[in-house]
C-alpha cells in the first residue's frame, strides 16, 4: 500500500501521501501532502500541500505532472526538488526547507489476506477511495526552516499515511495523535466514513492503536463493533471486539481548509485541525489498562457526518 498505485491511470484519479511532523517541544507542527491529480478530461497536475498546524495556514504548490516521479520498486517519490519516502522528507518550497530523517518506524502489520490497513477490501477493484498507513509512529532528526526561522526537529515525532482512488468519501471523521504522556510510543488513528458499495453504501471504520509495541486493530473487516456520537465541541467514538474496548473523545479545535479530490480533480475542501485533543481509554478483558490524552492531534469532520453516528453498537 505504501507505493504508488497510479501506473496506467490517465483520468479520474488521485493519489497522495500525508506526512505529519511535530517538533519535540510541540511548538511546531506541519503536514506535507504530495500527490497527483488527474481530472475527467485527462488534465493532470502534481502538487504539494503544506499545512501549518500552529499558524492554521495552508499553501498549495502546483507542479507539472511530468515532475511527479515515483519509484517502481518501493515508496519513493521525487517531485521537483522535493523528496518523499518512508525514511526521509526533503522540502524545498518558498516558505519551508528541510531534510528530515525518520527512524524507528512502526508500520501497519501486513498479512497475506490483509496487505494493509483496509484488510481484504484492498483487493476490491471498484472502491471509491483506498487508504494506507506507512508508519503510525517514528522519530525525526534534522532541521527545518519555515519563513526564515530555523527550527530544530531532532527528537520530534512523525506519522505517514496515504490515499488513492477517485474521490474522498461523502462524509467522514478522522483523527490521529502520537503525543501521549507515556513511557513508550503510543499512536492512535481512527476513521469512520460513508463507503459506496454496489449501488448502496455502508459505514466503514478503521482504527489503529499502538500501545506497548503492538498495533491493536478495530475495523469493519475484523468483526469489531462501533458507536459514534457527535456533539457541538466533541466527537465520541467507541470500538470493541471480544477482548478489547477502545473509548475515544476528540475535542475540536480551530483548523484550516485543505484541498481534497472529487473525481480526481482537486476541487473539494476539508477543514483539518492539528491542535485537537483526544482522550483515550483502552480496556483489556474489561480492565482499564490505558487512560491518557493525546495532544497535537489531527481532526477532520467532513460532510453530513450525522449519518455516521449511532447510539447502539453496530458493525
Image (tube, helix red, strand yellow):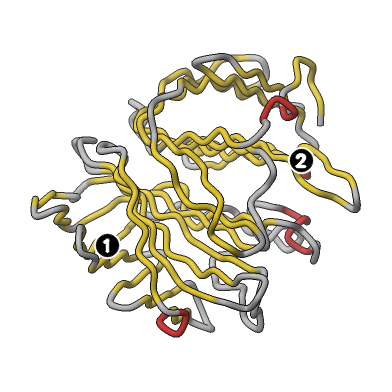
Percent of width and height locating residue 101 = 27, 62
| Element carrying mark 1 | strand
Percent of width and height locating residue 5 = 61, 73
The answer to whether residue 281 of the structure is visible from this angle is no
Q: Quadrant of the N terminus?
A: bottom right
Give whichever of discs 1 and 2 has the lower sequence position.
Answer: 1
Left or right: residue 26 compared with residue 40: left
Nearest the viewer among 250 and 1 is 250
Direction left: furthest residue: 149
Q: In this view, does 214 lie above or below 139?
A: above
Q: Tag 2: Cα neighbours inside 10 Å, few (<14), some, or many (≥20)? A: many
Percent of width and height locating residue 261 = 58, 57
Judging by the rendered image, the residue that carries numbered circle 2 is: 220
Percent of width and height locating residue 259 = 48, 52
Nearest the viewer among 278 and 172 is 172
**Residue at left 27%, top 67%?**
90
**Residue at left 44%, top 78%?**
68
**Residue at left 54%, top 68%?**
37
The answer to whether residue 217 of the structure is visible from this angle is yes
Q: How many marks?
A: 2
Left or right: residue 205 compared with residue 210: right
Q: Tag 1: Cα neighbours inside 10 Å, few (<14), some, or many (≥20)? A: some
Q: Is residue 176 above or below residue 128?
A: above
Q: Is residue 103 above or below residue 289?
A: below
Q: Distance between the residues labelled 1 and 2?
A: 34 Å
| Element carrying mark 2 | helix
Judging by the rendered image, the residue that carries numbered circle 1 is: 101
**Residue at left 59%, top 66%?**
14
Q: Quadrant of the C terminus?
A: top right
Amino acid at each position: 500500500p505504501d507505493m504508488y498505485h497510479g501506473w496506467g491511470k490517465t483520468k479520474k484519479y488521485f493519489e497522495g501521501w500525508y506526512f505529519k511532523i511535530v517538533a519535540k517541544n510541540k511548538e511546531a507542527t506541519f503536514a506535507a501532502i504530495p500527490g497527483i491529480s488527474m481530472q475527467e478530461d485527462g488534465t493532470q497536475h502534481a502538487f504539494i500541500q503544506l499545512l501549518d498546524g500552529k499558524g492554521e495556514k495552508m499553501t498549495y504548490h502546483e507542479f507539472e505532472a511530468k515532475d511527479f516521479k515515483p519509484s517502481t520498486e518501493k515508496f519513493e517519490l521525487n517531485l521537483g526538488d522535493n523528496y518523499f519516502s518512508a525514511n526521509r522528507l526533503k522540502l524545498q518550497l518558498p516558505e519551508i526547507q528541510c531534510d528530515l530523517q525518520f527512524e524507528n518506524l512502526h508500520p501497519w502489520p501486513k498479512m497475506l489476506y490483509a496487505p494493509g490497513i483496509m484488510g481484504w477490501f484492498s483487493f476490491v477493484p471498484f472502491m471509491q477511495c483506498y487508504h494506507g498507513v506507512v508508519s503510525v509512529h517514528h522519530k525525526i532528526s534534522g532541521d527545518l526552516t519555515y519563513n526564515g526561522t530555523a527550527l530544530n526537529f531532532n527528537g520530534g515525532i512523525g506519522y505517514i499515511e496515504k490515499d488513492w482512488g477517485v474521490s474522498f468519501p461523502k462524509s467522514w471523521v478522522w483523527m490521529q495523535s502520537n503525543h501521549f504522556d507515556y513511557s513508550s510510543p503510543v499512536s492512535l488513528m481512527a476513521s469512520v466514513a460513508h463507503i459506496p458499495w454496489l449501488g448502496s453504501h455502508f459505514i466503514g471504520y478503521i482504527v489503529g492503536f499502538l500501545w506497548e509495541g503492538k498495533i491493536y486493530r478495530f475495523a469493519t473487516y475484523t468483526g469489531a463493533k462501533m458507536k459514534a456520537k457527535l456533539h457541538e465541541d466533541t466527537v465520541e467514538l467507541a470500538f470493541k471486539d471480544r477482548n478489547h474496548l477502545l473509548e475515544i473523545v476528540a475535542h475540536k479545535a480551530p483548523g484550516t481548509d485543505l484541498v481534497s479530490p472529487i473525481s480526481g480533480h482537486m476541487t473539494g475542501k476539508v477543514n483539518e485541525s492539528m491542535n485537537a485533543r483526544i482522550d483515550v481509554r483502552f480496556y483489556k478483558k474489561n480492565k482499564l489498562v490505558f487512560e491518557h490524552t493525546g495532544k497535537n492531534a489531527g481532526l477532520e469532520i467532513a460532510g453530513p457526518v450525522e449519518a455516521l453516528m449511532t447510539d447502539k453498537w453496530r458493525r
